Image (cartoon, coloured by chain):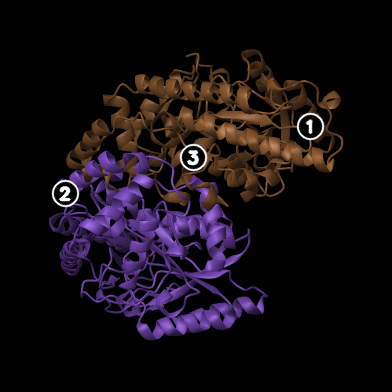
Chain colours: A purple, B brown
Amino acid sequence: MFAVASRPEVVSLAGGMPNLAALPLEALSAEVADLVRREGQVALQYGSAQGVPALREQICEVMRLEGINADPGDVVVTVGSQMALDLVTRIFCDPGDVVLAEGPSYVGALGSFAAYQARVVHVGMDEHGLVPELLRDAVRTLAAQGITPKFLYTIPTFHNPAGVTLTLERRAEVLEICARYGIGVIEDNPYGLLGFSGRIYPALRSFDPGVIYLGSFSKTFASGLRVGWALVPPAVRDRLVLAAESATLCPPSFNQMLVSRYLEGHDWRSQVKTFTEAYRDRRDAMLSALETYLPDDCRWNVPDGGFYVWLTVPEGVDTKAMLPRAVTARVAYASGTGFYADGLGSRQLRLSYCYPTPERITEGVRRLGGVLEAELDVMRTFGSPARISPSRSGAVRGPQSPSPDTA
Amino acid sequence: MFAVASRPEVVSLAGGMPNLAALPLEALSAEVADLVRREGQVALQYGSAQGVPALREQICEVMRLEGINADPGDVVVTVGSQMALDLVTRIFCDPGDVVLAEGPSYVGALGSFAAYQARVVHVGMDEHGLVPELLRDAVRTLAAQGITPKFLYTIPTFHNPAGVTLTLERRAEVLEICARYGIGVIEDNPYGLLGFSGRIYPALRSFDPGVIYLGSFSKTFASGLRVGWALVPPAVRDRLVLAAESATLCPPSFNQMLVSRYLEGHDWRSQVKTFTEAYRDRRDAMLSALETYLPDDCRWNVPDGGFYVWLTVPEGVDTKAMLPRAVTARVAYASGTGFYADGLGSRQLRLSYCYPTPERITEGVRRLGGVLEAELDVMRTFGSPARISPSRSGAVRGPQSPSPDTA
């Protein structure tokens, strides 16, 4: 299935691969050549488990854009922020422990939680992100069972997959709830600098130094270098470094030094702006195509940044069951079920606009529209499920908030 | 302590950093520049969790030198072989499970075993490597307690830290014992191609496709790229790939493609020969200095490859307690206690000859000799411990087998 979906004739709206077309390869080529020539004996050698000190200082400058005031000594460089997430989960979770996460949530986080046998309790979102009332409800319900969640895992800004952003008011509220109930917060923020309005949201970590913050150069520079990081409270740092040492001895010096040189010698903020403009064009192409080609009773969000549109299809359509037929029609997406630990999401799917060209996006959505129409035709013909009716689903075609996870 | 030991005036015989002085940096610089220029869009992008297919094929060619006949589909590329070891431990071990390992054993392996709360039972070695009779004894003792070890972790060739190599006869015997008692075998082989006689030992995996084999380019090419691998039976492969995806999503494409180009376009076998010759010179310098400068009652092995000499000091000397005094005398080593999970090793230490120049090695050993003489002087003066006497320790100065872990 994955092999078929990877064929060039299939428009993949499934993956989260950043678009690297705008990278200045000639300049990078010269940079990396110089790195090997001048500093090869260090770059090709083992390094510190915590990461290259110069890069950790630069990471603090990057985070300052989001209002974070951090000490380089509290930064741990990892092989992508996935590794940081995986190790933090290892440190905090024993089998059976409960963690809170938005519903839907990042599939790679759910993978790590499953690997350590943590139980995920999802908390619903609306167009303003995680709903504080639902968070409070979830915490109280768990408390009544004698359970304190180990942490809340959240992507407050340009959420993957929901595409929404937590408002400032709610940021304060979410932190307040977690503080009151003694629940740690893990803030995953790979997309924070990719806002289409140019606005940069203050990170949760900027309000509370107890927050564990995960960052990455995968979306702002190059994913294939696998350079991410965690900013952690001092009490967690030593355990994280020890776990990182056990996991990989050290992150690759070569990759870290290349990122460090890139941040030092190139106008990386202007490069991020170039990336973001490309993503905005692609988002626009996708939204326009969704309006044009999707049948009634579809709902989706309008992302202000990041990579994703979260789509709710008409009742009765099962996005997981439909996927092989979509791939046959030469379009791929990520079924919503992968973003829930509890079996929900079969009426949702994630569309990524990050990688294909606007033309391919338009064509992909056109094909998806055809596939959905065909599904609805079959349902109408065979009357299954009979409960589909305009009176129940309403005239909800068009951009809307993501459905809460109870949908 | 580590900070002091890292000062340039201290001769460090402690670390296991490969000597990269012989790397052809100009050629590598041109290679990596071309990689970014021509294939940057792939090299800087996410890749497969299992690793780049072309590299996995080349890895099979590398392993063929050790008699291994493998399918690239069973190779999983990891961020150094440490990551493979960590993930295999994660897959097989629940807290409290028992694993077998040579005594002494690789400190990074002991770290991963501890991270997953596995209990290590050490099996003794002599100058021919792991002693099969001791392995059988350990297995039987555990069986009597109703315990089957999850696996035997072994470094059969140019052992870290003991410097010894398992004979061919014993390879068969060890595999036979493990097969009979249903114990998996993890063969860690980072040094296999670094033999001073030019001889390449057949890997355990070459005799038994059920063996999990861990390999690395850290010692044959460049440790700072963090490219290692596991060759696993098909039944383990999917679980390992899933665990790797959870751990880092994918290993860095960039690093893998650089290694692949290096293997393809450079005479890497001749480069390994150059490395090995440098290590042999350094070993010779160390052995000669040990003969010259060490006090009586010291014993060490004569390694045929790899990076390490394992030294047993006179009775009464505690290598861990002595280390600060050695660093003050501007020489550092790795105390033997780090290579045991059970508190042994205080009369042993590991000396690495891989990184410093022969002149520095000689000077470092001269300093170590002085430190040891001073320890012995204090012991003689204060009569503590009184049990030191030539009649008990014998005239054992000079190259000998590594002490069994009961010493």
Q: State the residue position of label 1.
A: B406
| Upstream in sequence: badge 3 or badge 1 | 3
Residues tagged by mark 3 and mark 2 found on one chain of the structure:
no
Amino acid marked by disc 2: Ala
- Answer with left or right where residue A167 lies relative to residue A368: right
Q: Position of residue B239 (x, y in %)?
A: 52, 42
Mark yes or no: residue B235 visible: yes
Q: Quadrant of the C terminus of chain A?
A: bottom left
CA distance separating discs 1 and 2: 59 Å
- Please tell me whether mark 1 sits on a helix, a strand or a loop: loop
Q: Residues within 10 Å of mark 2 (few under 14, many from 20)?
A: some
Residue most extreme to the front: B381
Q: Position of residue B381 (x, y in %)?
A: 81, 41
Which-is-in-front pick, marks 3 and 2?
2
Taking depth in this image into account, of B108 and A183 the one nearest to the observer is B108
- Identify the residue under disc 3: B238
Q: Is residue A316 above or below residue B196?
A: below
For mark 2, what is the residue?
A: A27
- 1 or 2: mark nearer the eye: 1
Q: Where is A165 relative to B13, above or below?
A: below
Give the residue type at disc 1.
Thr
Name the image quarter holding residue A143: bottom right
Residue A304 appears left or right of A237: left
Rounded to the nearest whole Å, what is the CA distance between mark 3 and mark 1? 40 Å
Horizontally, is B44 left or right of B400 in the view?
Answer: left
Nearer the viewer's eye, disc 3 or disc 1? 1
